[in-house]
Amino acid sequence: MAKIVVITSGKGGVGKTTTSASFAAGLALRGYKTVVIDFDVGLRNLDLIMGCENRIVYDFVDVITGNARLSQALVKDKQLENLYILPASQTRDKDALTDEGVSEVMAELSKQFDYIICDSPAGIERGAQLAMYHADEAIIVTNPEISSVRDSDRIIGILQSQTKKSRREPRDCSRAFDYHSL
Ligand SMILES: Nc1ncnc2c1ncn2[C@@H]1O[C@H](COP(=O)(O)OP(=O)(O)OP(=O)(O)O)[C@@H](O)[C@H]1O
Ligand SMILES: [Mg+2]
């Protein structure tokens, strides 16, 4: 069973994708078989940061729609033996990722990998919710701007109430910290 980690923030452009790539590479270097999934449907970037943009044939949505098998969509990193990427689709259809489809892909990847890293899109909409839903752990990326800190605070609340794990193990969803004191 893989450990699933979401890299999220609420705020856009704070370093989620860069962190996803470097964290996944670090795990792979330590010998863990790791896959990093780009949940940013329509605005994929992870492939660029990981330098595999020219090797994408199929993507996450192709797997969910049955257009490709998971093994066809996974792109193996050229430098690290244990590192794979599941690229996002460039479709404009934001509903292309279905709940059932994502669950099936997660279950399948869980059998094959030690770590699944989910690179979340910005915001708190459907894409971000799908990216965090299956996560066992979350890394929240932020910067010192107060708007970024407040968005992170909001994300903590959502993580504590709307993930599969939080529904199994409900916890106190009160505010994690007072950002005005920063
Ligand atoms: N630790 C860092 N220090 C300085 N700059 C960084 C750091 N991490 C990322 N960046 C830069 O910040 C910019 C945005 O990074 P990135 O694409 O990873 O953010 P993101 O949160 O994934 O954005 P989006 O919300 O659009 O998906 C890039 O130019 C990247 O090089
Ligand atoms: Mg990103």
Image (cartoon, rainbow, N blue to C red):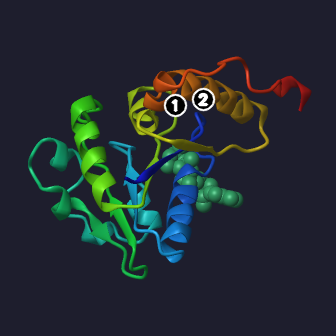
What percent of the width, then of the height, locates residue 85? 35, 62
Identify which amino acid the numbered label 1 is placed on. Gly
Question: At x 21% / y 45%, what residue is drawn?
Answer: 61
Q: Nearer the viewer, mark 1 or mark 2?
A: 2
Query: Which SS class for mark 1?
Result: loop
- Residue 77 in which image quadrant: bottom left
Q: Which residue is mark 1?
A: 123
Asked whether, in this view, residue 50 is left or right of residue 109, the answer is right
Q: Quadrant of the C terminus?
A: top right
Question: In this rendering, does residue 90 appear at all?
Answer: no
Q: Secondary structure at mark 2?
A: helix
**In this view, 87 is above or below 105:** below
At horizontal 50% and vertical 27% (from top left) the residue drawn is: 124
- Distance from disc 1 to disc 2, alpha carbons, whole Å, reads 9 Å
Q: Quadrant of residue 58?
A: bottom left
Question: Is 108 in front, or is 86?
Answer: 108
Q: Is residue 173 visible?
A: yes
Residue 168 on image: x %, y %: 46, 25
Three-letter code for the amino acid on which mark 2 is drawn: Ile
Which residue in the protein does label 2 denote? Answer: 155
Residue lying at 52% horizontally and 31% vertically, measured from the top left: 123
Task: Indicate the quadrant where residue 147 lies.
Answer: top right
Q: Is residue 64 left or right of residue 129?
A: left
Disc nearer the start of the sequence (1/2): 1
Q: Where residue 73 appears, x then y in whole percent?
A: 21, 60
Query: Around disc 2, counting alpha carbons within 10 Å, would you say few (fewer than 14), some (14 to 19), or many (20 or more)?
Result: many
Q: Residue furthest left?
A: 67
Identify the disc placed on residue 176.
none
Residue 174 sits above or below residue 112 on the image: above
Q: Nearer the viewer, residue 128 or 175?
A: 175
